[in-house]
Image (spheres, rainbow, N blue to C red):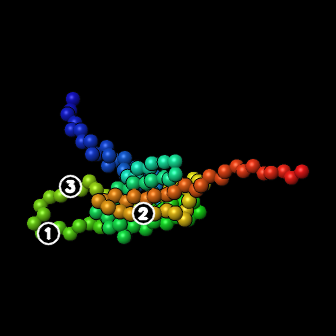
Amino acid sequence: MSIVRYEPFDVMNDLQASLQRLFEAVPRQDRDDSSAATADWVPAVDIQEFADRFVLFVDLPGVNPEAVDLTLDQGVLTLSGQREKQAVGDELVRERRERGLGRFHRRFILPDTADADGVKANGRQGVLEIQIPKQAKAQPRRIQVAA
């Protein structure tokens, strides 16, 4: 009987390699290059719904809010940008990196009740807040019938 050392990161590396092979197996013309599958990392997003609006909170630490590209086209809200690697001096001996670097991309399909003209976004303390108002509901009206 031999002793085998268990390396949990080996399992993760094997899984990542398998997923990479899976994505490479998809023909290029069938792939959507703007999808999150082609991004280097995906920011975490909290979504809240209120009676009059939707609110998205996107965690983007280390990303300048002005460098974030936010578009709304045909009911699809697209969020993309990039987090750059910070410059470190020559005295760095070792580094462990848990935050993703490079391009990010997220898409959200908005419901028909969303008011595309009223979307507002602001960033502070590493969190991008996106306010999406809801359209006023069409109220039924009573039609007077003339005699």
Percent position of residue 129, x then y? 39, 58
Q: Is residue 4 above or below residue 49?
A: above
| Disc with the residue nearer the chain's start (2 vs 1) | 1
Q: Residues within 10 Å of mark 1 (few under 14, many from 20)?
A: few
Percent position of residue 102, x then y? 34, 64
The residue furthest right is 147
* Nearest-to-viewer mark from 2 and 1: 2
**Residue where numbered disc 1 is placed:** 89
Question: Is 143 situated left or right of 103 in this image?
Answer: right
User: Of helix, strand and loop, which one carries label 2?
Assistant: strand
Q: State whether residue 83 appears in this view.
A: no
Question: Is 13 situated left or right of 39 in this image?
Answer: left
Query: Which residue is more in the foreground, 9 or 71?
Result: 71
The residue furthest left is 91
Residue plotted at (29% across, 59% down) = 125
| Disc with the residue nearer the chain's start (2 vs 3) | 3
| Disc with the residue nearer the chain's start (1 vs 3) | 1
User: Of helix, strand and loop, which one carries label 1?
Assistant: loop
Q: Amino acid at mark 2?
A: Ala
Percent position of residue 134, x then y? 55, 55
Residue plotted at (32% across, 67% down) = 64
Q: Amino acid at mark 3?
A: Arg
**Snapshot quadrant of residue 104:** bottom left
Percent position of residue 111, x then y? 57, 53
Say which mark, if any, is on residue 56.
none
* Nearest-to-viewer mark from 2 and 3: 2
Say which mark, if any, is on residue 121.
2
Residue plotted at (20% across, 69% down) = 87
**Residue where numbered disc 3 is placed:** 96
Query: Which residue is more in the foreground, 9 or 94?
Result: 94
Residue plotted at (54% across, 65% down) = 117
Q: Amino acid at mark 1?
A: Gly
